[in-house]
Image: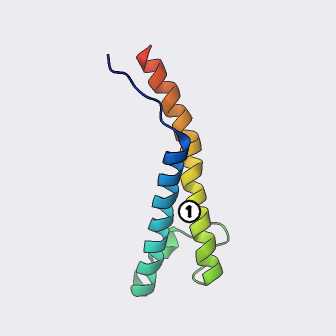
Amino acid sequence: MSDTKSIRIYPVGMSLGILLAVSFALCVLFGLLFPWATMYQAWLPLLPGVSWISWPSALLGLVESFAYGWYIAVIFVPAWNFFSRRAMA
């Protein structure tokens, strides 16, 4: 039987937050470089208050994307630890 360690919220939250924030920033860059592609419309329903495009809106999008990463970590990590402990029992 393998010894499963529990995972911690901080590294998962930071990793997911940065992943989503960088993804948002890349989508904004893509939208600026290729405006006919309209990729930004996929983000607008998910990020309240974000519009296309201004500096305050882009900053808000980065903050909200980072917060979504933490939200996922807060739900995922305890669930993972709970079920991995149950599987070991």
Residue most extreme to the right = 49
Residue appearing at x 57%, y 83% in the figure:
53
Tell which of 10 and 62 is nearer to you. 10
Name the residue nearer the viewer: 37 or 66: 66
Figure check: 6 above or below 87: below
Location of the N terminus (image quadrant): top left
Q: Residue at x 42, y 17 (%)?
A: 88
Residue sitting nearer the eye, 34 or 78: 78
User: Would you say residue 47 is visible in this rendering?
Assistant: yes
For the view shown, which residue lies furthest in the left direction? Answer: 1
Q: Amino acid at mark 1?
A: Ser
Above-or-below relation of 39 to 20:
below
- Give the left or right position of residue 31, taking residue 72 as reference: left
Residue 4 to residue 27: above or below:
above
Residue found at x 55% / y 42% = 9
- The residue at the point 54 percent across, 54 percent down is 69
Residue 38: give x, y in percent of width and height.
45, 79
Q: Position of residue 72 (x, y in %)?
A: 55, 47
Q: Residues within 10 Å of mark 1 (few under 14, many from 20)?
A: many
Q: Residue furthest top?
A: 89
Q: How is the image coloured?
A: rainbow
In the image, residue 75 sits, relative to residue 38, either above or below, namely: above
Among the 4 quarters of the image, the one containing residue 26:
bottom left
Q: Is residue 27 left or right of residue 57?
A: left
Q: Label 1's element?
A: helix
Residue 58: x and y in percent read 58, 76
Residue 85, position as x, y percentages in the image: 47, 21
Give the quadrant of the C terminus. Answer: top left
The answer to whether 69 appears left or right of 33 in the picture is: right
Regarding residue 46, the answer to whether it shows in the image is no
Q: Which residue is mark 1?
A: 65
